[in-house]
Image (cartoon, rainbow, N blue to C red):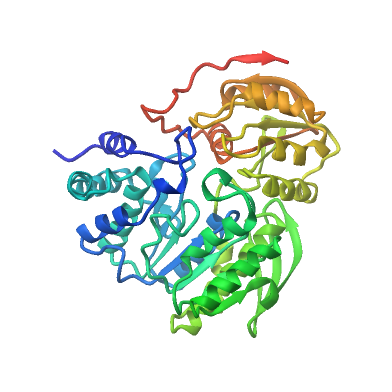
C-alpha cells in the first residue's frame, strides 16, 4: 500500500530539525559528509543538472523565484528548492513556481527512506536531518523529471549547508546582515565568510548590493582565491523605478551592456536590487551558453510570485500589510517602503512575533517610529518567542502594547476589532506570522504537525 502524505510527513518530521529546534546549534553540528553520503547512496542525484546556488541573509527566496520564473519563461523545466515553507511542506520542492503534489511528496519519501535508514545505521555520521532529507528530495525529484535547471536556495549559512554539495553553473549571494549570530558568527565578516562558502573554483558568482562594505571585501577575497569571476551588482548595474502601485512596480534596469524595461508584482525598492541580481544571473548564464532571451526576462518578472513579502490586502474594511521581515535591517526597509504604498494617516496596528534567536528588540526599534499600537502574538512555530517578553521590550521602547495573544489568529482578530477605517494593520516579525495571517486572509487550511506545539484557542491578555 502506498505511503500516505500524512505518514510521509510524520517520518520526515521525526528527524532532527534545526529549523524548529529551540536551541541554536554550533558549527560542530554541521558538516557535509552525511549529505554527500546520502546523495551518493541515491546515485549521485545532486550531479548532472545545471545549478544556480543562492545564499544570503535577505532576498534569497525572492531572487531564486525571479531566476526560476525567467528560466521557466524561456521554456526550461526548472526545479526550485527553498525553505522554510509558509503553509505546506510541499512548497519546499517546486517545478517552476508550483509546489509538488502531496502524492509526489509521499512517493519521494518512500523512494528515499531506505537510503535514509542506511546512512543513519551504517554511515558513521548519525541520522539524516530533516533539512538534509528535504534537500535530497529536491535533488531526487529534479533527477526524476530530468529538469533542465535547478535553482537551489541555501538553508542556513552556505559553507556547511547541506545544499553545498552542488557544483553550480553560477553562485548568487544576496544582501548580508547580522542574523543567526549564535550559529554563523556575530560579525559581518564571519557571516559573509560562511555565505562565501558557496563560491566554487572557477565558477562565476553574482554578489548583490551590500549595505556592509566588509561583506563585499570578504566576497572579493574569496572569489579571487577561487579564481571565480565576480559580478558586483552595485557596481555593474543601474536601476530606476518608474511607477508603483499595490498591483506592482515598473522599472528600468541596465548593466553589462544590456538594458530592460520591466514590471513585477513584487513590491519594495529592495525587490529592484533582487531583480538586478537575478538579471545579472541570467546574463551570466547567457554568456555561458544558455539561452535566456530578453522576452523571457520580461515575462519572468511579470509572472513571478512570492507570497509573504510586502503583500497588501483589504480585509473586512481594513487595510492589511503582511511581510515576513525577520531581522532589524529588513524591518527598517519595510518601514521605509510602507509610506509609498499605503496611507499612513490613521493608526498603525502592529501584529508582531519574532522567533527565538532573532532580534525582537532591533525589529521593534525599527517599528517604533510608526508609533504603533502593538499586539504581540505567538505563532505555531516552536521557536516563536514568548509574547510577554517581547511585550516588555516593546514597552521599554515606548511602544503602546494593547494586548498579547497565544495565537496569531487571535491577535489578528483583535487587530480587526480595535482598528478603525483608515488604520493600517501591519503583520510582521517572522515568516511564521506572515504565513498564519495569510491563512486567515486566503482561507488556507493550515498544515499542523504532530510534534509542533498545537494550535490552541486564543488567549488574550490585556497589558
What residue do we see at 44% from left, 84% from top?
289
Image-quadrant location for residue 362: top right
Using the image, determine if residue 371 lies above or below residue 305.
Answer: above
Residue 335 position within the rendered picture, expressed as x and y whole percent measured from the top left = 76, 45
Give 1 or 172, whichever is nearer the viewer: 172
Seen as rendered, the residue at the extreme front is 28
What residue do we see at 54% from left, 74% from top?
223
What residue do we see at 48% from left, 51% from top?
156
Question: In screen coordinates, is 326 left or right of 138?
Answer: right
The answer to whether residue 293 of the structure is visible from this angle is no
Residue 75 position within the rendered picture, expressed as x and y whole percent measured from the top left = 42, 72
- Quarter the N terminus occupies: top left
Image-quadrant location for residue 324: top right
Residue 381 position within the rendered picture, expressed as x and y whole percent measured from the top left = 49, 32
Question: In screen coordinates, is 335 left or right of 40?
Answer: right
Give 249 or 376, whichever is nearer the viewer: 376
Using the image, determine if residue 183 lies above or below residue 371.
Answer: below
Question: In screen coordinates, is 236 left or right of 204?
Answer: right
- Quarter the C terminus occupies: top right
The answer to whether residue 28 of the structure is visible from this angle is yes
Using the image, determine if residue 448 lies above or below residue 233.
Answer: above
Give 259 or 199, whichever is nearer the viewer: 199
Residue 281 position within the rendered picture, expressed as x and y whole percent measured from the top left = 53, 73
Total labels: the figure holds 0
Seen as rendered, the residue at the extreme right is 345
Amino acid at each position: 500500500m502506498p505511503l500516505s502524505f500524512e505518514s510521509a510527513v510524520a517520518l520526515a518530521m521525526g528527524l532532527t530539525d534545526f529549523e524548529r529546534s529551540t536551541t541554536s546549534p554550533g558549527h560542530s553540528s554541521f558538516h557535509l559528509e552525511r549529505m554527500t553520503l546520502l546523495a551518493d547512496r541515491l546515485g549521485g542525484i545532486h550531479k548532472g543538472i545545471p545549478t544556480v546556488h543562492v545564499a544570503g541573509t535577505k532576498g534569497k527566496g525572492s531572487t531564486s523565484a525571479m531566476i526560476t520564473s525567467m528560466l521557466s519563461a524561456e521554456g526550461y523545466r526548472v526545479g526550485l528548492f527553498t525553505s522554510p515553507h509558509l503553509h505546506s511542506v510541499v512548497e519546499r520542492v517546486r517545478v517552476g513556481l508550483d509546489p509538488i503534489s502531496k502524492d509526489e511528496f509521499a512517493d519521494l519519501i518512500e523512494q528515499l527512506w531506505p537510503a535514509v535508514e542506511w546512512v543513519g545505521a551504517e554511515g558513521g555520521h548519525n541520522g539524516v536531518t530533516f533539512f538534509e532529507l528535504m534537500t535530497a528530495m529536491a535533488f531526487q525529484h529534479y533527477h526524476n523529471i530530468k529538469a533542465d535547471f535547478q535553482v537551489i536556495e541555501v538553508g542556513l549559512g552556505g559553507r556547511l549547508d547541506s545544499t553545498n554539495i552542488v557544483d553550480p553553473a553560477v553562485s548568487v549571494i544576496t544582501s548580508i546582515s547580522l542574523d543567526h549570530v549564535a550559529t554563523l558568527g556575530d560579525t559581518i565578516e564571519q557571516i559573509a565568510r560562511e555565505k562565501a562558502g558557496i563560491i566554487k573554483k572557477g565558477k562565476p558568482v553574482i554578489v548583490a548590493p551590500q549595505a556592509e562594505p566588509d561583506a563585499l571585501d570578504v566576497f572579493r577575497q574569496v572569489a579571487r582565491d577561487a579564481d571565480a569571476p565576480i559580478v558586483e551588482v552595485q557596481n555593474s548595474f543601474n536601476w530606476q523605478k518608474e511607477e508603483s502601485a499595490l498591483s506592482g512596480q515598473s522599472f528600468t534596469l541596465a548593466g553589462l551592456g544590456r538594458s530592460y524595461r520591466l514590471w513585477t508584482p513584487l513590491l519594495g525598492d529592495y525587490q529592484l536590487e533582487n531583480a538586478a541580481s537575478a538579471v545579472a544571473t541570467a546574463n551570466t548564464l547567457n554568456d555561458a551558453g544558455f539561452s535566456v532571451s530578453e522576452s523571457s526576462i520580461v515575462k519572468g518578472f511579470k509572472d513571478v510570485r512570492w507570497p509573504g513579502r510586502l503583500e497588501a490586502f483589504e480585509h473586512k474594511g481594513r487595510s492589511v500589510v503582511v511581510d515576513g521581515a525577520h531581522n532589524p535591517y529588513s524591518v527598517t526597509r519595510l518601514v521605509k517602503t510602507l509610506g509609498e504604498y499605503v496611507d499612513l494617516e490613521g493608526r498603525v496596528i502592529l501584529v508582531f512575533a519574532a522567533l527565538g534567536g532573532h532580534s525582537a528588540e532591533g525589529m521593534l526599534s525599527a517599528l517604533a517610529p510608526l508609533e504603533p499600537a502593538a499586539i504581540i502574538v505567538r505563532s505555531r512555530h516552536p521557536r516563536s518567542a514568548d509574547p510577554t517578553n517581547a511585550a516588555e521590550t516593546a514597552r521599554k521602547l515606548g511602544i503602546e502594547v494593547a494586548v498579547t495573544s497565544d495565537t496569531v489568529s487571535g491577535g489578528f482578530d483583535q487587530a480587526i476589532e480595535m482598528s478603525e477605517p483608515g488604520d493600517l494593520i501591519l503583520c510582521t516579525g517572522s515568516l511564521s506570522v506572515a504565513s498564519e495571517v495569510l491563512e486567515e486572509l486566503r482561507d488556507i487550511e493550515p498544515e499542523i504537525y504532530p510534534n509542533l506545539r498545537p494550535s490552541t484557542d486564543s488567549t488574550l491578555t490585556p497589558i
